[in-house]
């Protein structure tokens, strides 16, 4: 399962992180943060409904983006939540949901006029997290979004390829074997694991893993990173993305 980017650091103003990080990285997933700053992908081919959703979402502080086809939805890898219409011109929304699920754990709420039970069951079986039938109130939609985000943030364990990172126990396993890390090494790894596969900038790692008042020469991160990679036993598990930062390498699909 490949997570797509939650949001790129460049698009994330500091104010979008209302939870201060003080030295220790805590997972819940950043999706658990309130809706402010959340990148929402609106997959809706009806321009009027799409525009209305985009406008409403922007008013509650989200960063919405609308696409009108399933193909465009699958090209977009940067959403923190997807609102998915089922009746799309190029493919069925249920199939879009299945394809999204294959590569991402991004929360999906199906938003559709198909209210009959078989349609709801098909969408939920395809991996949708929730379902809302048009017409609906905007307050109900945002409440459902928050509920879905809370559930998405409810896990403390990230499994990513050979890595298993348990935030509650602060334990890391590679291929099932526990790897002993220092606190700082764990925090750096946890930063990358909050949204595996997304490039995390040096600045973001400093923001999250170091106390905000703690000045550290940039090189300190390289030292910890080198030790972390050595202890994980395979330097390729963490990729350096030149000029941008680091990310957990995408696991090879068997
Ligand atoms: Ca439609």
Image (spheres, helix red, strand yellow):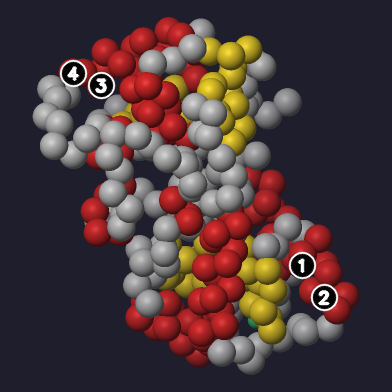
Report the mark closest to the observer, 3 or 1.
3
Q: Secondary structure at mark 3?
A: helix
Whether residue 77 is situated above or below residue 134 in the rendered picture: above
Mark positioned earlier in the residue sequence (4 or 1): 1
| Residue 119: image tag | 2
| Residue 95: image tag | none
Ligand 1 found in image quarter:
bottom right
**What crowding class fits label 1: few (fewer than 14 Cα within 10 Å), some (14-19), or many (20 or more)?**
many
Mark positioned earlier in the residue sequence (2 or 4): 2
Task: Give the residue at mark 4.
Answer: 219
**Would you say the beta carbon of the disc 4 residue lies within 8 angstroms of ligand 1?**
no
Mark positioned earlier in the residue sequence (3 or 1): 1
Name the residue at the right extreme: 118
Q: Position of residue 75 (x, y in %)?
A: 54, 55
Image side of residue 122 versus residue 6, left or right: right
Q: CA distance from mark 3 to mark 4?
A: 5 Å
Front residue of this view, candidates 92 and 31: 31
Q: Position of residue 35 (x, y in %)?
A: 42, 67
- Res. 89 in view: no
Q: CA distance from mark 2 to mark 4?
A: 54 Å
Report the mark closest to the observer, 2 or 4.
4
Q: Secondary structure at mark 4?
A: helix
| Residue 123: image tag | 1
Image side of residue 93 versus residue 7, left or right: right
Task: Give the residue at mark 3.
Answer: 221
Q: Are marks 1 and 2 in contact (CB under 8 Å)?
A: yes
**What quarter of the picture does the C terminus occupy?**
top right
Q: Are marks 3 and 4 in contact (CB under 8 Å)?
A: yes
Q: Residue at x 58, y 14 (%)?
A: 178
- Number of numbered tags placed on the structure image: 4
Q: Residue at x 49, y 12 (%)?
A: 180
């Amino acid at each position: 399962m490949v997570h797509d980017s939650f949001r790129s650091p460049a698009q994330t103003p500091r104010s979008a992180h209302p939870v201060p990080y003080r030295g220790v990285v805590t997972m819940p997933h950043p999706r658990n943060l309130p809706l402010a700053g959340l990148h929402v992908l609106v997959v809706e081919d009806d321009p009027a409904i799409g525009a209305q959703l985009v406008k409403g979402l922007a008013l509650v502080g989200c960063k919405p983006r609308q696409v009108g086809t399933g193909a465009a939805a699958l090209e977009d890898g940067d959403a923190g939540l997807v609102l998915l219409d089922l009746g799309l011109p190029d493919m069925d929304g249920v199939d879009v949901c299945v394809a999204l699920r294959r590569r991402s754990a991004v929360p999906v709420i199906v938003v559709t006029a198909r209210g009959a039970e078989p349609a709801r069951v098909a969408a939920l079986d395809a991996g949708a997290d929730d379902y809302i039938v048009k017409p609906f109130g905007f307050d109900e939609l945002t409440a459902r979004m928050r509920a879905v985000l809370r559930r998405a943030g409810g896990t403390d364990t990230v499994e990513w390829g050979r890595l298993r990172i348990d935030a509650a126990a602060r334990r890391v396993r590679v291929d099932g074997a526990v790897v002993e890390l220092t606190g700082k090494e764990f925090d750096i790894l946890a930063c990358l694991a909050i949204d595996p596969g997304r490039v995390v900038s040096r600045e973001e790692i400093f923001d999250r893993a170091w106390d905000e008042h703690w000045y550290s020469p940039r090189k300190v991160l390289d030292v910890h990173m080198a030790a972390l990679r050595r202890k994980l036993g395979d330097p390729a598990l963490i990729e350096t993305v030149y000029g941008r930062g680091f990310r957990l390498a995408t696991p090879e699909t068997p």
